[in-house]
Image (cartoon, grey):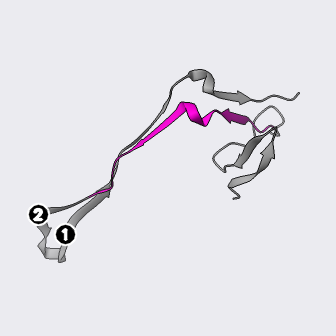
């Protein structure tokens, strides 16, 4: 599915994302529009962490390892995110 910035509308960038439903409404023909003031949103990310555990799977000739990080998204003001939908 297409995704990414596809143009501009009213001076705002238009971004298509396949995670936004396109079959809402009684006729399943409504697409919601999400408007976000990105300056009021904060994204926190930790550095990537890798671990290898000392317990081995000797019978399988392998180790147990994992790679992970943490992230959080915070909106400073609830009014910074709006949804436009309907048939108008």
Q: Is residue 14 above or below residue 77?
A: below
Most distant residue in the right direction: 88
**Where does residue 37 sit, x and y in percent of width and height?**
63, 33
Using residue 56 as the reference point, say whether residue 25 is left or right of it: right
Q: Quadrant of residue 23?
A: top right
Mark 1 vs mark 2: which is more N-terminal? 2
Q: Residue at x 55, y 22 (%)?
A: 77
What residue is disc 1 on? 63
Q: Residue at x 73, y 45 (%)?
A: 13
Give the secondary structure at mark 2: strand
Using residue 2 as the reference point, say whether residue 42 is left or right of it: left
Residue 53 within the magenta-colored segment of the rendering: no
Q: Residue at x 77, y 30 (%)?
A: 85
Using residue 3 as the reference point, say whether residue 78 is left or right of it: left
Q: Quadrant of residue 12?
A: top right
**Where does residue 21 sit, x and y in percent of width and height?**
69, 42
**One can see residue 53 in this view:** yes
**One can see residue 22 in this view:** no
- Which quadrant: the N terminus? bottom right
Using residue 6 as the reference point, say whether residue 66 is left or right of it: left
What residue is disc 2 on? 55
Label 1–label 2 contact, CB within 8 A = no
Q: Residues within 10 Å of mark 1 (few under 14, many from 20)?
A: few
Q: Is residue 35 above or below residue 46?
A: above
In front of the other: 36 or 87: 36
**Where does residue 5 sit, x and y in percent of width and height?**
70, 52
In front of the other: 57 or 46: 46
Give the secondary structure at mark 1: strand
- Which quadrant: the C terminus? top right
Residue 38 within the magenta-colored segment of the rendering: yes
Span of residues in magenta: 30-49
- Disc on res. 43: none
């Amino acid at each position: 599915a297409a995704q990414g910035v596809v143009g501009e509308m009213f001076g705002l960038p238009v971004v298509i994302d396949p995670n936004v439903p396109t079959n809402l409404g009684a006729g399943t023909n409504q697409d919601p529009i999400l408007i976000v003031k990105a300056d009021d949103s904060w994204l926190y990310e930790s550095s990537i962490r890798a671990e290898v555990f000392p317990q081995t799977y000797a019978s399988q000739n392998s180790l147990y390892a994992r790679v992970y990080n943490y992230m959080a998204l915070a909106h400073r003001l609830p009014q910074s995110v709006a949804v436009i939908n309907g048939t108008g």
